[in-house]
Image: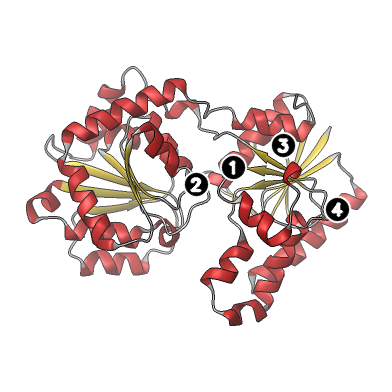
Amino acid sequence: MQLAFILYKYFPFGGLQRDFMRIAQECQKRGHHIRVYTMIWQGEIPQGFEVLIVPVKAIFNHNRNKKFTAWVKADLITRPVDKIIGFNKMPDLDIYYAADPCFEDKAQNLRHSFYTKTNRYKHFYQYEKAVFDSNSKTQILMISALQQPLFIKHYQTPEQRFHLLPPGIATDRKAPANAAEIRAAFRQEFNLTDDQLLMMQIGSGFKTKGLDRTLKALASLPDQLKKQTKLIVIGQDELRNFILTIKKLGLSNQVQILKGRDDIPRFLLGADILIHPAYNENTGTILLEAMVAGLPVFVKDVCGYAHYIQEADCGIVITSPFQQTSLNQALATMLTDKTARQRWQQNGLTFAENADIYSMPSKAADIILGTTP
Protein backbone atom coordinates (compact mmCIF):
# COMPACT_ATOMS: atom_id res chain seq x y z
CA MET A 1 0.00 0.00 0.00
CA GLN A 2 0.94 3.63 -0.45
CA LEU A 3 0.55 5.39 2.89
CA ALA A 4 0.50 9.15 3.51
CA PHE A 5 1.64 10.35 6.95
CA ILE A 6 0.85 13.97 7.81
CA LEU A 7 2.27 16.07 10.65
CA TYR A 8 2.89 19.80 10.92
CA LYS A 9 6.55 19.52 11.86
CA TYR A 10 9.16 16.85 12.46
CA PHE A 11 12.19 17.12 14.72
CA PRO A 12 14.04 14.12 16.14
CA PHE A 13 13.42 14.70 19.84
CA GLY A 14 9.67 15.37 20.09
CA GLY A 15 7.49 12.64 21.60
CA LEU A 16 4.85 12.80 18.86
CA GLN A 17 7.56 12.89 16.21
CA ARG A 18 9.36 9.86 17.61
CA ASP A 19 6.08 7.94 17.69
CA PHE A 20 5.36 8.89 14.08
CA MET A 21 8.80 7.73 12.97
CA ARG A 22 8.59 4.37 14.68
CA ILE A 23 5.07 3.67 13.36
CA ALA A 24 5.98 4.73 9.81
CA GLN A 25 9.14 2.60 9.85
CA GLU A 26 7.16 -0.38 11.15
CA CYS A 27 4.76 -0.01 8.19
CA GLN A 28 7.70 0.32 5.82
CA LYS A 29 9.29 -2.80 7.31
CA ARG A 30 6.12 -4.68 6.39
CA GLY A 31 6.58 -3.74 2.73
CA HIS A 32 4.52 -0.56 2.37
CA HIS A 33 5.49 2.77 0.81
CA ILE A 34 5.76 5.88 3.00
CA ARG A 35 5.02 9.44 1.87
CA VAL A 36 5.25 12.24 4.44
CA TYR A 37 3.70 15.71 4.28
CA THR A 38 5.08 18.31 6.68
CA MET A 39 5.93 22.00 6.91
CA ILE A 40 9.22 21.53 8.77
CA TRP A 41 11.64 18.60 8.75
CA GLN A 42 14.74 18.55 10.93
CA GLY A 43 17.14 15.63 10.87
CA GLU A 44 17.90 12.82 8.46
CA ILE A 45 15.29 11.37 6.11
CA PRO A 46 15.05 7.56 6.39
CA GLN A 47 15.93 5.63 3.27
CA GLY A 48 12.85 4.97 1.17
CA PHE A 49 10.73 7.77 2.68
CA GLU A 50 9.29 10.36 0.31
CA VAL A 51 9.21 13.57 2.35
CA LEU A 52 7.36 16.60 0.96
CA ILE A 53 8.08 19.87 2.77
CA VAL A 54 5.02 21.96 1.98
CA PRO A 55 5.94 25.58 1.10
CA VAL A 56 3.30 27.55 3.00
CA LYS A 57 3.66 30.66 5.13
CA ALA A 58 1.33 32.76 7.28
CA ILE A 59 1.57 35.05 10.29
CA PHE A 60 -0.86 32.98 12.39
CA ASN A 61 -0.62 29.23 12.94
CA HIS A 62 -4.25 28.58 12.13
CA ASN A 63 -3.96 30.30 8.73
CA ARG A 64 -0.76 28.38 7.99
CA ASN A 65 -2.48 25.11 8.91
CA LYS A 66 -5.34 25.86 6.49
CA LYS A 67 -2.91 26.53 3.65
CA PHE A 68 -1.02 23.37 4.51
CA THR A 69 -4.08 21.11 4.47
CA ALA A 70 -5.29 22.69 1.20
CA TRP A 71 -1.89 22.04 -0.43
CA VAL A 72 -1.82 18.45 0.81
CA LYS A 73 -5.39 17.81 -0.34
CA ALA A 74 -4.59 19.08 -3.84
CA ASP A 75 -1.49 16.88 -4.05
CA LEU A 76 -3.40 13.81 -2.86
CA ILE A 77 -6.00 14.36 -5.58
CA THR A 78 -3.31 14.14 -8.25
CA ARG A 79 -1.37 11.38 -6.45
CA PRO A 80 -3.84 9.35 -4.37
CA VAL A 81 -2.84 6.96 -1.60
CA ASP A 82 -4.46 3.99 0.11
CA LYS A 83 -4.51 5.42 3.64
CA ILE A 84 -4.03 8.89 5.16
CA ILE A 85 -2.63 8.90 8.71
CA GLY A 86 -2.51 12.19 10.62
CA PHE A 87 -0.53 13.06 13.72
CA ASN A 88 -2.26 16.42 14.08
CA LYS A 89 -6.01 16.98 13.99
CA MET A 90 -7.25 17.90 10.52
CA PRO A 91 -9.98 16.96 8.00
CA ASP A 92 -10.06 13.93 5.68
CA LEU A 93 -7.96 11.53 7.76
CA ASP A 94 -8.48 7.80 7.64
CA ILE A 95 -6.58 7.37 10.91
CA TYR A 96 -5.60 9.90 13.58
CA TYR A 97 -2.90 9.31 16.19
CA ALA A 98 -4.21 11.13 19.28
CA ALA A 99 -1.07 12.54 20.84
CA ASP A 100 -2.78 15.77 21.92
CA PRO A 101 -5.50 16.23 24.57
CA CYS A 102 -9.03 17.39 23.83
CA PHE A 103 -8.84 20.98 22.58
CA GLU A 104 -12.53 21.72 23.13
CA ASP A 105 -12.44 20.62 26.75
CA LYS A 106 -9.48 22.90 27.46
CA ALA A 107 -11.15 25.78 25.60
CA GLN A 108 -14.33 25.42 27.65
CA ASN A 109 -12.70 24.96 31.04
CA LEU A 110 -9.35 26.75 30.97
CA ARG A 111 -10.00 29.74 28.73
CA HIS A 112 -12.03 32.95 29.01
CA SER A 113 -15.41 32.78 27.27
CA PHE A 114 -14.18 35.39 24.78
CA TYR A 115 -11.68 32.85 23.42
CA THR A 116 -14.44 30.90 21.66
CA LYS A 117 -15.13 33.95 19.50
CA THR A 118 -11.63 34.05 18.01
CA ASN A 119 -10.58 32.74 14.61
CA ARG A 120 -7.91 30.62 16.26
CA TYR A 121 -10.50 28.82 18.39
CA LYS A 122 -12.83 28.29 15.43
CA HIS A 123 -10.03 26.75 13.37
CA PHE A 124 -8.81 24.28 15.99
CA TYR A 125 -12.36 23.38 17.00
CA GLN A 126 -13.32 22.66 13.39
CA TYR A 127 -10.19 20.55 12.82
CA GLU A 128 -10.81 18.56 16.00
CA LYS A 129 -14.49 18.12 15.09
CA ALA A 130 -13.47 16.82 11.65
CA VAL A 131 -11.74 13.92 13.43
CA PHE A 132 -14.06 13.20 16.35
CA ASP A 133 -17.55 14.16 15.11
CA SER A 134 -20.09 11.35 15.30
CA ASN A 135 -20.45 11.45 11.51
CA SER A 136 -16.70 11.24 10.82
CA LYS A 137 -15.20 7.97 9.59
CA THR A 138 -11.74 8.59 11.07
CA GLN A 139 -10.36 5.76 13.20
CA ILE A 140 -8.60 7.04 16.32
CA LEU A 141 -5.42 5.61 17.85
CA MET A 142 -5.56 6.58 21.53
CA ILE A 143 -2.49 6.61 23.74
CA SER A 144 -4.27 7.90 26.86
CA ALA A 145 -7.46 6.43 28.27
CA LEU A 146 -8.01 9.67 30.22
CA GLN A 147 -8.90 11.65 27.10
CA GLN A 148 -11.44 9.32 25.46
CA PRO A 149 -14.40 10.31 27.70
CA LEU A 150 -13.71 13.99 26.96
CA PHE A 151 -13.86 13.49 23.20
CA ILE A 152 -17.06 11.47 23.56
CA LYS A 153 -18.56 14.17 25.80
CA HIS A 154 -17.94 16.98 23.31
CA TYR A 155 -18.42 15.17 19.99
CA GLN A 156 -20.47 12.02 20.75
CA THR A 157 -17.78 9.95 19.04
CA PRO A 158 -18.82 6.27 18.74
CA GLU A 159 -16.70 4.15 21.07
CA GLN A 160 -15.92 1.58 18.37
CA ARG A 161 -13.79 4.14 16.52
CA PHE A 162 -11.32 4.37 19.41
CA HIS A 163 -8.34 1.98 19.57
CA LEU A 164 -6.33 2.18 22.80
CA LEU A 165 -2.65 1.45 22.21
CA PRO A 166 -0.09 0.28 24.76
CA PRO A 167 2.81 2.66 25.41
CA GLY A 168 5.62 2.60 22.89
CA ILE A 169 8.85 2.72 24.86
CA ALA A 170 12.05 2.02 22.93
CA THR A 171 13.84 -0.97 24.40
CA ASP A 172 17.14 0.97 24.46
CA ARG A 173 15.70 2.86 27.45
CA LYS A 174 16.00 -0.27 29.63
CA ALA A 175 18.97 -0.32 31.98
CA PRO A 176 21.73 -2.40 30.35
CA ALA A 177 24.00 -4.86 32.14
CA ASN A 178 26.72 -2.20 32.44
CA ALA A 179 24.37 0.49 33.82
CA ALA A 180 26.65 1.13 36.83
CA GLU A 181 29.64 1.81 34.56
CA ILE A 182 27.62 4.18 32.37
CA ARG A 183 26.38 6.01 35.47
CA ALA A 184 29.89 6.40 36.88
CA ALA A 185 31.27 7.74 33.57
CA PHE A 186 28.33 10.15 33.20
CA ARG A 187 28.72 11.56 36.69
CA GLN A 188 32.44 12.01 36.19
CA GLU A 189 31.78 13.88 32.92
CA PHE A 190 29.34 16.23 34.65
CA ASN A 191 31.53 16.65 37.75
CA LEU A 192 29.03 15.06 40.12
CA THR A 193 30.40 13.71 43.38
CA ASP A 194 28.95 10.71 45.21
CA ASP A 195 27.09 12.89 47.71
CA GLN A 196 25.49 15.12 45.07
CA LEU A 197 21.97 14.52 43.81
CA LEU A 198 20.96 15.05 40.18
CA MET A 199 17.39 15.83 39.12
CA MET A 200 16.43 15.52 35.44
CA GLN A 201 13.55 17.25 33.70
CA ILE A 202 13.17 16.15 30.08
CA GLY A 203 10.74 17.34 27.41
CA SER A 204 10.17 20.28 25.10
CA GLY A 205 7.63 22.92 26.06
CA PHE A 206 9.03 23.95 29.44
CA LYS A 207 5.99 26.02 30.39
CA THR A 208 3.56 23.13 29.93
CA LYS A 209 5.99 20.69 31.54
CA GLY A 210 6.04 22.79 34.73
CA LEU A 211 9.67 23.88 34.78
CA ASP A 212 8.65 26.94 36.79
CA ARG A 213 7.31 24.61 39.49
CA THR A 214 10.54 22.61 39.48
CA LEU A 215 12.68 25.72 39.90
CA LYS A 216 10.58 26.96 42.83
CA ALA A 217 10.78 23.54 44.48
CA LEU A 218 14.57 23.42 44.06
CA ALA A 219 14.91 26.91 45.52
CA SER A 220 12.77 25.93 48.52
CA LEU A 221 15.00 23.05 49.65
CA PRO A 222 16.88 23.37 52.96
CA ASP A 223 20.23 25.06 52.36
CA GLN A 224 22.45 22.00 52.72
CA LEU A 225 20.18 19.80 50.57
CA LYS A 226 19.92 22.56 47.97
CA LYS A 227 23.72 22.79 47.75
CA GLN A 228 23.88 19.03 47.15
CA THR A 229 21.23 19.07 44.39
CA LYS A 230 21.71 19.82 40.70
CA LEU A 231 19.12 20.06 37.93
CA ILE A 232 19.64 19.34 34.24
CA VAL A 233 16.81 20.26 31.88
CA ILE A 234 16.70 18.89 28.32
CA GLY A 235 14.34 20.13 25.62
CA GLN A 236 13.40 22.97 23.31
CA ASP A 237 11.59 26.18 24.22
CA GLU A 238 11.99 29.92 24.57
CA LEU A 239 14.45 30.26 27.45
CA ARG A 240 14.49 33.97 28.32
CA ASN A 241 11.90 33.96 31.12
CA PHE A 242 13.28 30.75 32.64
CA ILE A 243 16.84 32.09 32.67
CA LEU A 244 15.58 35.20 34.46
CA THR A 245 13.77 33.01 37.00
CA ILE A 246 16.89 30.91 37.58
CA LYS A 247 18.92 34.04 38.29
CA LYS A 248 16.22 35.51 40.51
CA LEU A 249 16.06 32.32 42.60
CA GLY A 250 19.86 32.15 42.92
CA LEU A 251 20.12 28.84 41.07
CA SER A 252 22.56 29.76 38.29
CA ASN A 253 25.23 27.36 39.57
CA GLN A 254 22.80 24.47 40.00
CA VAL A 255 20.70 24.46 36.84
CA GLN A 256 21.87 23.52 33.35
CA ILE A 257 19.58 23.64 30.29
CA LEU A 258 20.50 21.54 27.25
CA LYS A 259 18.90 21.24 23.82
CA GLY A 260 17.25 18.01 22.70
CA ARG A 261 19.73 15.19 22.13
CA ASP A 262 19.89 11.51 21.26
CA ASP A 263 21.74 10.15 24.31
CA ILE A 264 18.88 10.43 26.83
CA PRO A 265 19.43 6.88 28.23
CA ARG A 266 22.80 8.03 29.60
CA PHE A 267 21.14 10.87 31.53
CA LEU A 268 18.46 8.55 32.91
CA LEU A 269 21.16 6.22 34.27
CA GLY A 270 23.26 9.05 35.68
CA ALA A 271 20.50 10.91 37.52
CA ASP A 272 18.87 10.30 40.91
CA ILE A 273 15.28 11.33 40.11
CA LEU A 274 13.18 12.46 37.16
CA ILE A 275 10.89 15.38 37.98
CA HIS A 276 7.82 16.12 35.82
CA PRO A 277 5.29 18.47 37.49
CA ALA A 278 3.39 19.19 34.26
CA TYR A 279 0.36 21.45 33.98
CA ASN A 280 -1.11 18.95 31.52
CA GLU A 281 0.31 15.96 29.66
CA ASN A 282 -1.62 13.53 27.48
CA THR A 283 0.76 10.67 28.27
CA GLY A 284 4.35 11.40 29.33
CA THR A 285 6.54 8.84 27.59
CA ILE A 286 9.58 10.04 29.50
CA LEU A 287 7.97 8.79 32.73
CA LEU A 288 8.06 5.20 31.49
CA GLU A 289 11.51 5.65 30.00
CA ALA A 290 12.75 6.67 33.43
CA MET A 291 11.01 3.74 35.11
CA VAL A 292 12.59 1.10 32.87
CA ALA A 293 15.99 2.72 33.40
CA GLY A 294 15.53 2.36 37.16
CA LEU A 295 15.18 6.11 37.75
CA PRO A 296 12.63 7.12 40.44
CA VAL A 297 9.92 9.45 39.13
CA PHE A 298 8.35 12.52 40.74
CA VAL A 299 5.25 13.47 38.73
CA LYS A 300 1.93 15.34 38.77
CA ASP A 301 -1.20 13.20 38.48
CA VAL A 302 -2.51 15.02 35.38
CA CYS A 303 -0.05 13.07 33.20
CA GLY A 304 -1.71 10.20 31.34
CA TYR A 305 1.02 7.73 32.31
CA ALA A 306 1.28 8.82 35.96
CA HIS A 307 -0.81 5.83 37.02
CA TYR A 308 2.05 3.50 36.01
CA ILE A 309 4.31 5.14 38.61
CA GLN A 310 1.67 4.70 41.29
CA GLU A 311 0.71 1.14 40.37
CA ALA A 312 4.31 -0.10 40.12
CA ASP A 313 5.50 1.98 43.12
CA CYS A 314 8.29 3.71 41.23
CA GLY A 315 8.17 7.18 42.77
CA ILE A 316 5.85 9.90 44.02
CA VAL A 317 2.66 11.13 42.33
CA ILE A 318 1.47 14.58 43.41
CA THR A 319 -2.33 14.75 43.39
CA SER A 320 -4.62 17.57 42.27
CA PRO A 321 -5.38 20.32 43.03
CA PHE A 322 -1.79 21.46 42.71
CA GLN A 323 -0.09 23.19 45.65
CA GLN A 324 3.50 24.37 45.37
CA THR A 325 4.12 23.79 49.07
CA SER A 326 3.11 20.14 48.73
CA LEU A 327 5.46 19.74 45.80
CA ASN A 328 8.29 21.37 47.74
CA GLN A 329 7.84 19.13 50.77
CA ALA A 330 7.50 15.93 48.73
CA LEU A 331 10.62 16.73 46.71
CA ALA A 332 12.67 17.26 49.87
CA THR A 333 11.43 13.91 51.19
CA MET A 334 12.28 12.12 47.95
CA LEU A 335 15.79 13.54 47.80
CA THR A 336 16.63 12.63 51.40
CA ASP A 337 15.08 9.13 51.47
CA LYS A 338 17.77 6.98 49.83
CA THR A 339 16.11 3.73 50.95
CA ALA A 340 12.87 4.67 49.16
CA ARG A 341 14.77 5.63 46.02
CA GLN A 342 16.49 2.24 45.99
CA ARG A 343 13.09 0.52 46.32
CA TRP A 344 11.61 2.60 43.51
CA GLN A 345 14.63 1.83 41.34
CA GLN A 346 14.27 -1.92 41.80
CA ASN A 347 10.51 -1.75 41.20
CA GLY A 348 11.15 0.09 37.93
CA LEU A 349 13.62 -2.53 36.74
CA THR A 350 11.12 -5.29 37.58
CA PHE A 351 8.38 -3.38 35.74
CA ALA A 352 10.66 -3.11 32.67
CA GLU A 353 10.87 -6.89 32.39
CA ASN A 354 7.16 -7.68 32.82
CA ALA A 355 5.00 -4.86 31.43
CA ASP A 356 3.64 -4.53 27.86
CA ILE A 357 5.03 -1.08 27.17
CA TYR A 358 7.09 -1.68 24.04
CA SER A 359 4.57 -2.86 21.41
CA MET A 360 2.82 0.39 20.40
CA PRO A 361 4.39 0.75 16.90
CA SER A 362 3.49 -2.83 16.03
CA LYS A 363 -0.09 -2.53 17.31
CA ALA A 364 -0.55 0.83 15.54
CA ALA A 365 0.71 -0.65 12.27
CA ASP A 366 -1.75 -3.55 12.65
CA ILE A 367 -4.65 -1.09 12.81
CA ILE A 368 -3.35 1.12 9.99
CA LEU A 369 -2.82 -1.85 7.70
CA GLY A 370 -6.03 -3.60 8.70
CA THR A 371 -4.30 -6.68 10.08
CA THR A 372 -5.64 -6.49 13.63
CA PRO A 373 -7.05 -9.86 14.74
Q: Secondary structure at mark 3?
A: loop
Res 143 label: 1
**Residue 240 location in percent, x, y?**
36, 68
Quarter-of-image position of residue 245: bottom left
Residue type beneath disc 4: Asp
Residue type beneath disc 1: Ile
**Badge 4 is on which residue?**
75
Quarter-of-image position of residue 72: bottom right
**Badge 2 is on which residue?**
304
Residue type beneath disc 2: Gly
What is the CA distance from the residue labelled 1 to the residue labelled 3? 25 Å
Judged left or right of residue 202, residue 41 is right
**Residue 161 location in percent, x, y?**
75, 44
What is the CA distance from the residue labelled 4 to the residue labelled 3? 17 Å
Judged left or right of residue 356, residue 73 is right
**Badge 3 is on which residue?**
49
In the rendered structure, are the residues bearing label 4 and label 3 in contact, judged by CB atoms less than 8 Å apart? no
Going from N to C along the chain, the mark reached first, 4 or 1, is 4
Badge 2, how many Cα within 10 Å: few under 14, some, many 20+? many
Q: Marks 1 and 3: which is nearer the front?
A: 1
Badge 3, how many Cα within 10 Å: few under 14, some, many 20+? some
In depth, the one of 87 and 352 nearer the eye is: 352
